[in-house]
Amino acid sequence: MRQVLATTQAPSSPMFSQGVKAGPFVYVSGTAGIDVATGKLAGPTIGEQVRQALTNCEEVLKAANATLDDVVEVGVLLADPDDFAGMNEEYARWFPIEPPTRYAAKLGAVIPGVLVSIRMTAYVG
């Protein structure tokens, strides 16, 4: 069974679903550090944008009755690979022990001001 997830607590687009629950898995689309209250980036730093992107992902997980504890994989795309250490610093606050698998790569699209996009997969078996 496939269930499209939607929440007003995370950025949305007519081009893709915020998330999809398929069987025991929840797939959260890549999201930037956009604050839904303002519609703008959470700030100019990698830490601020990572924090907001993870908050946005967490809100989509909630729409599926899932939590960060259910996350099995995270994908991080960075506009500038030099921001890797700053991303890790904030990321470690969210997954301090037994973190999920993760990959990080360079963000291919150039979107003014966007430093990071984060996606995740959760297992809610």
Image (cartoon, rainbow, N blue to C red):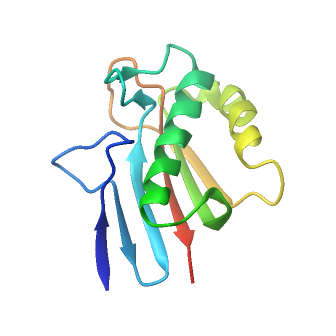
Q: Position of residue 29 (x, y in %)?
A: 38, 54
Residue name at image x 41 percent, y 48 percent: 30
As displayed, is residue 47 above or below residue 77?
Answer: above
Q: Is residue 57 left or right of residue 68?
A: left
As displayed, is residue 94 above or below residue 63?
Answer: above
Q: Position of residue 90 (x, y in %)?
A: 70, 32
Most extreme residue toward the top, as rendered?
A: 44
Q: Is residue 42 left or right of residue 89?
A: left
Q: Position of residue 50 (x, y in %)?
A: 57, 32
Most extreme residue toward the left, as rendered?
A: 14
- Total tally of numbered discs in the picture: 0
Q: Is residue 41 left or right of residue 73?
A: left
Residue name at image x 33 percent, y 50 percent: 7
Q: Quadrant of the C terminus?
A: bottom right
Q: Position of residue 25 (x, y in %)?
A: 48, 76
Which of the 4 image quarters holds residue 83? top right
Q: Nearer the viewer, residue 39 or 74?
A: 39
Residue name at image x 39 percent, y 72 percent: 21
Residue name at image x 49 percent, y 58 percent: 61
Which of the 4 image quarters holds residue 9? top left
Q: Quadrant of the N terminus?
A: bottom left
As displayed, is residue 71 above or below residue 75?
Answer: below
Q: Is residue 111 left or right of residue 57?
A: left
